Amino acid sequence: MTEIALDAIGTPHKWGGTDANKFDCSGLVQFAYDRVGISLPRVRTAQMRAGGPISLNPDLFRAGDILGLSTTEPDKTSHLGLYVGDGEFIHSNSSGVRISSMQNVYWQDHIKAARRIVYSTLPGAVGAVRTGSLPPGDSCDSAIGLLFTAQGA
């Protein structure tokens, strides 16, 4: 799903945008997950209740984790990003869809929440989708649903 989001780099920002022509932050996250068959709620607040909470330590983030960032009010998630790996995340802000670094002090100071939707810990699975809360570090071996590859089909 991160590849789908990365293909959107440079797409203009539009409040409420949810398609490949224009995105807002939650529209980009929803679009990327939808393209791999995972349905997420449309709005930021609902997306930040999906999956399970994870540690805010960037060293523990995995590609596909949703990052909740505070850009307008202290301690309130007002912006979302999708972690893509190597200390970077993709998001749509007023400049459009772009990559930003977790090494940037601004983002380090403004990350307020992180959610993991997809877990890839089970053999044969592309990912396991969990809808309940998880303690940090849980491997989710008892996932709610699995997305299997269509090998040999």
Image (cartoon, helix red, strand yellow):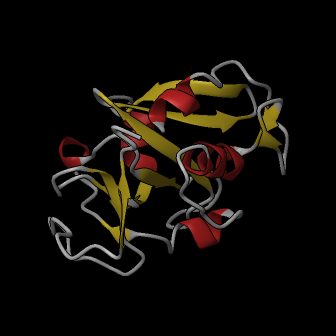
Residue most toward the bottom?
A: 132
User: Residue at the spot x=70%, y=64% of the render?
Assistant: 43
Residue 115 placement, left or right of 69: left
User: Residue at the spot x=66%, y=45% of the render?
Assistant: 31
Query: Could you say where residue 51 lies in the image, as x and y percent from the top left?
Result: 41, 69
**Can you say whether 85 is above or below 113 in the image?**
above
Query: Could you say where residue 152 lies in the image, as x and y percent from the top left?
Result: 34, 37
Q: In the image shown, does 62 or 126 lie closer to the viewer?
A: 126
Quarter assignment of residue 145: bottom left
**Can you say whether 93 is above or below 76 in the image?**
above
User: Residue at the spot x=36%, y=45% of the render?
Assistant: 149
Residue most toward the front?
A: 153
User: Residue at the spot x=50%, y=75% of the render?
Assistant: 49
The quadrant of the rendering that contains the C terminus is top left
Residue most toward the top?
A: 10
Residue 112 placement, left or right of 9: left
**Can you say whether 93 is above or below 67 in the image?**
above
Query: Could you say where residue 119 lies in the image, as x and y percent from the top left?
Result: 28, 57
The number of discs equals 0
Q: In the image shown, does 121 or 56 lie closer to the viewer?
A: 121
Query: Could you say where residue 30 lies in the image, as x and y percent from the top left?
Result: 63, 52
Q: In the image shown, does 7 or 11 lie closer to the viewer?
A: 7
Quarter assignment of residue 141: bottom left
